[in-house]
Image: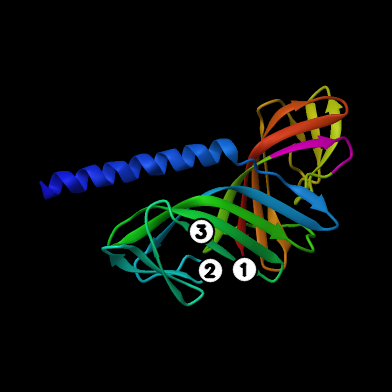
Amino acid sequence: MRLLDDHRARQRAWLLRCLLIIILSLLTTACVRNDHGTLHYSGPTEESIAVGQTLQGTNVRYVRETPDGAELLIDDQRAVKRIGDFVGWQGSLGRDFQADLGLRVVYYTADKVQLAGTADLTINNASPVPGAFPEKPIVAYRVPVTYNIARGDTIPGTTLTYEGKTEQGARIGGLPPGDYPYRQAADSLVWSGRLADGALLRVDLRVVIFTEQRIQLAGIATLAAG
């Protein structure tokens, strides 16, 4: 009977997890805005904290599983959280890299606590410089992004520009010397480098549509501390 109850509890937790992720995906719209050197990224995120460990880049620590819920330390204060409870954190991931996390407990075990919610990320003094992106960054967030770029403008957070429609396709400026500059609809476009002090970016994009005057792109932005 105990095994059956445990199975049902885990099944309910799994269903709640799926529901939370679906709701967040539907209700959360990621946006990027370049305003006086400041970039804003927002999107759904899912995080896991092993027992005795801290959520990377924050001071949220999972202490242990208790009969009343998951015991956390947040800002060195004890907090017991049940499934569905809110876990928030605001702080700096780097000198010019700020994060505002709004998470909820999806499930917890003796080994880990699983969280899902939103990540609002702000990069100040953004001045993109092309470069390598770490294969396995210690602290990273992936958010969906969409861009509608006029001819002559730069894709926010990158050094790439849209130079207009040609017979070969959409011409992209700012690529490394020797790289093929033309893209057709559904083609990929990747950029990586340093955004600001303590902030790295990689964007994996696809061309949605392009005209003489503008190009639309969509994909994933991965922001890492470093």
The reply, left or right, for residue 66 in relation to residue 53 is left
User: x%, y% of residue 136?
Assistant: 51, 58
Instruction: Indicate the secondary structure of the residue bearing disc 3.
Output: loop
Residue drawn 79% across and 29% down? 170
Give x and y (percent) for residue 65. Answer: 29, 64
Select label 3 or label 2 by which is in front: 2
On residue 91, the disc is 1
Say left or right for 48 vs 222.
Answer: left
Say whether residue 102 is left or right of residue 71.
right
As rendered, which of 107 and 207 lies closer to the eye?
107
> Within 10 angstroms of label 2, few (less than 14), some, or many (20 or more) residues?
some
The answer to whether one can see residue 131 in this image is: no
Quadrant hosting residue 63: bottom left
Q: Give whichever of 144, 206 is nearer the camera.
A: 144
Q: Earlier in the sequence, mark 3 or mark 2?
A: 2
Kindly indicate whether the residue at mark 2 contacts the one at mark 3 (C-beta within 8 angstroms).
no
- Figure coloring: rainbow
Mark 1 or 3, closer to the camera = 1
**Which label number is shown at residue 58?**
2
Which residue was labeled with disc 3?
A: 136
Q: Earlier in the sequence, mark 1 or mark 2?
A: 2
- Disc 3 marks a residue whose amino acid type is Lys
Residue 199 place in picture, x, y as percent: 67, 63
Residue 89 position (above or below residue 151): below
**Please, what secondary structure does the residue beneath circle 1 have?**
strand
Can residue 51 be seen by looking at this rendering? yes
The residue at 28%/65% (across/down) is: 66
Tell me if residue 171 comes above or below residue 41 in the rendering. Answer: above
Residue extent of the magenta highlight? 146-153
Q: Amino acid at mark 1?
A: Gly
